[in-house]
Image (spheres, grey):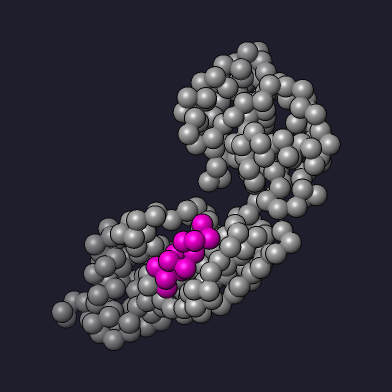
Amino acid sequence: MIGPMTGVLVLAATPIGRVADAPPRLAEELATADVVAAEDTRRLKRLTTDLGVTVSGRVVSYFEGNESARTPVLLEALLAGERVLLVTDAGMPSVSDPGYRLVAAAVEHDVLVTAVPGPSAVLTALAVSGLPVDRFCFEGFLPRKAGERSRRLQALAREERTMVFFEAPHRTETALEAMASAFGDDRPAAVCRELTKTHEEVQRGPLAELVSWAAEGVRGEVTIVVAGAVPGADIATDPDGLRSAVAEREEDGMTRKEAIAEVARLAGVPKREVYDLVHKS
């Protein structure tokens, strides 16, 4: 139940490129909020200037470096009945940007949390990628260390949903190489660069081809979209491959009966055949 004297936390999406993409409500919220918490106050100033808006409330910085310390201060304002608007440099707050801690604290204290929907690099890249969009997952930024990055991608090798990643331009080639190693050179993908901006570019193709493209250098904001695994594509249909696939699933916690049924379905072979192979071994 929402407390009767609490304020409202508003998460507002900001343009990821063209200021004309700003949702109409953004200007209204900027002009009327009691507190505007911004990831970068200088970028907020440019945004309000472009929108022709004057901020009447208090402006405070809220970024990764001060998020933990600033959250209690903003929560206090919310509990005092103030309307707090949270904006980041681009896109929706808390999606690989500051915001989660404040949202969690507000929810814990029964403060109303709402949003001004708008631009999103995740959904924009997904939509223009040409890859399946019926089921997808957002993986954010990959770890910078090679070993951690490799382990993360190996854990996703059998993910069947389309995957969306953020990446820094100078690490794009390295990330694509690691993806090709984990997912296979032929896995379809798309690299979306500078979405909605003047130099927007979308490169589509197998991962190996995109690695070669990225070797020439990548600039700007980058979002990578990778097709999910094809069910059963990693299962070899020879006897050893089928037995190995069943064993892997048993190690993951499936019963032998469940593992045999899944392997048979994914590999497109009779269940009895897989059963006989496993039990004869």
Quarter the C terminus occupies = bottom left
- Where does residue 42 sit, x and y in percent of width and height? 66, 36
Residue 174 is inside the magenta segment? yes
- Where does residue 196 sit, x and y in percent of width and height? 72, 58
- Where does residue 242 sit, x and y in percent of width and height? 28, 79
In-front residue for pair 4/217: 217
Residue 126 shows in this picture = no
How many numbered marks, from 0 up? 0
23 relative position to 217: left or right: right
State the residue at coordinates (84%, 36%). 52
Up the image or down, 117 lies above or below 219; here it is above
Q: Which residue in the rendered view is the most extreme toward the bottom?
A: 238
Up the image or down, 213 lies above or below 142; here it is below
Residue 203 shows in this picture = yes
Q: State the extent of the magenta-drawn residues as a range.
A: 168-180
State the residue at coordinates (37%, 83%). 269
Q: Main secondary structure of the magenta part?
A: helix
Quarter the N terminus occupies = top right
In-front residue for pair 178/103: 178
Q: Which residue in the rendered view is the most extreme toward the right?
A: 52
83 relative position to 122: left or right: right
Residue 207 is inside the magenta segment? no
- Where does residue 167 sit, x and y in percent of width and height? 51, 58
77 relative position to 278: left or right: right
Up the image or down, 183 lies above or below 14; here it is below
State the residue at coordinates (39%, 55%). 144
Give the quarter of the image for residue 76. top right
State the residue at coordinates (29%, 73%). 245
In-front residue for pair 55/133: 55
Give the quarter of the image for residue 175. bottom left
